[in-house]
Image (cartoon, rainbow, N blue to C red):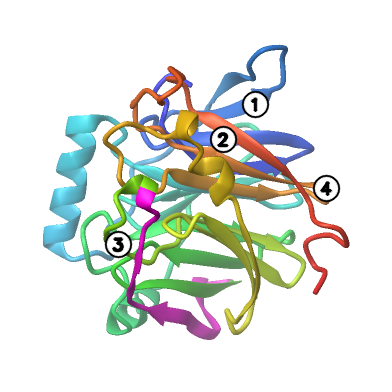
Amino acid sequence: MAGGNLSGLARCDGQLWAISDRDDQWLYRLQPEAGAWQAEAQPLQAPPPPATALTWGLAWRNRLSGLVRGGVLDFEGLSCDAAGNRYVLSETYSAVLRVTPQGQGEWLDIAPSVFRLARASGLLLDYNALAEGLAVSADGQRLWLAAEQRRRGLLGLQSSRTGWSCSDACVLLAEGGEQQVPIELGGEPEAIDFSDIVLRGDKLFTLERQAHQFCRRDAHSAQVERCWSYAATALAAPRLYPGVDYGTAEALWLDDDAAWIGIDNNEVVRADGEARPVLWQFAAPAGGWEAS
């Protein structure tokens, strides 16, 4: 990956795809090869972004950060529908880009009321704590967004002839709070968070980076049903990143027989010398992801 910094993952048309929050022009098709997977860059053409629904101060700071670090759009989530369209989330603009199989991009028209309701619930208010994950239904008619932290939350949207607006309930979840991170990462309190979401059937699966787990939730109420921890893998001494005191899992995808978790190393070299973004694969539990 040209810019590293793996930040989104999805299986589209039978193949795993990824995005980077440092690359605005590429989607990456992941090709398994001996020794290391290869990220094959596929160009995407994004028109100028829409007027942001964020406050002026947040919008200005986001754009400045993108110019300094690279990745002005700050892609932070990836999903796809049954027609082969890819959906990419821009954290900078809290906007969703739909990319055709041919690579042509179009920004979704999301009603301003969605963001007003989100802000009224305490979501999407802080720098670097905005929209961080998205999931799309197979028919391309429903969309979920995850707000990252310092009140994390889930938003539900529905497509219509006039654009995207709230479904039955726009804000499915909005909650604040802190949790103590593992002692391997310093043991200090950090804000609870979401770093990605996946839709399977009528269930949402949320990647919860600071807790080193992902959880199954009802797609309508966001109620937690079951969680799976990957802490033993992430906190093993060789896999720690020196000086990094937070979770680094940024991307989640679920197949019938496996979970895939993408690690954004932010250009930091791991304790064992690994400098590339990493993709972990975990076997599904007995009975599958829907089992009680």
SS at circle 4? loop
The residue depicted at 80 percent of the width and 74 percent of the height is: 292
Residue at the spot of label 4: 257
The residue depicted at 48 percent of the width and 21 percent of the height is: 1
Marks 2 and 4, how far apart at CA: 19 Å
The residue segment tinted magenta is 161-183
Circles 2 and 1: CB distance less than 8 Å? yes
Marks 3 and 4, how far apart at CA: 32 Å
Check disc 4: other Cα within 10 Å, few if <14, some if 14-19, many if 20+.
Answer: some
Residue 246 shows in this picture: no
Q: Amino acid at mark 4?
A: Asp
Tag 4 or tag 3, which sits nearer the N-term?
A: 3
Q: Which mark is residue 18?
A: 2
Mark whose residue sits in front, 4 or 1 = 4
Tag 1 or tag 2, which sits nearer the N-term?
A: 2
Q: Amino acid at mark 1?
A: Leu
Classify residue 200 by image quadrant.
bottom right
Tag 2 or tag 3, which sits nearer the N-term?
A: 2
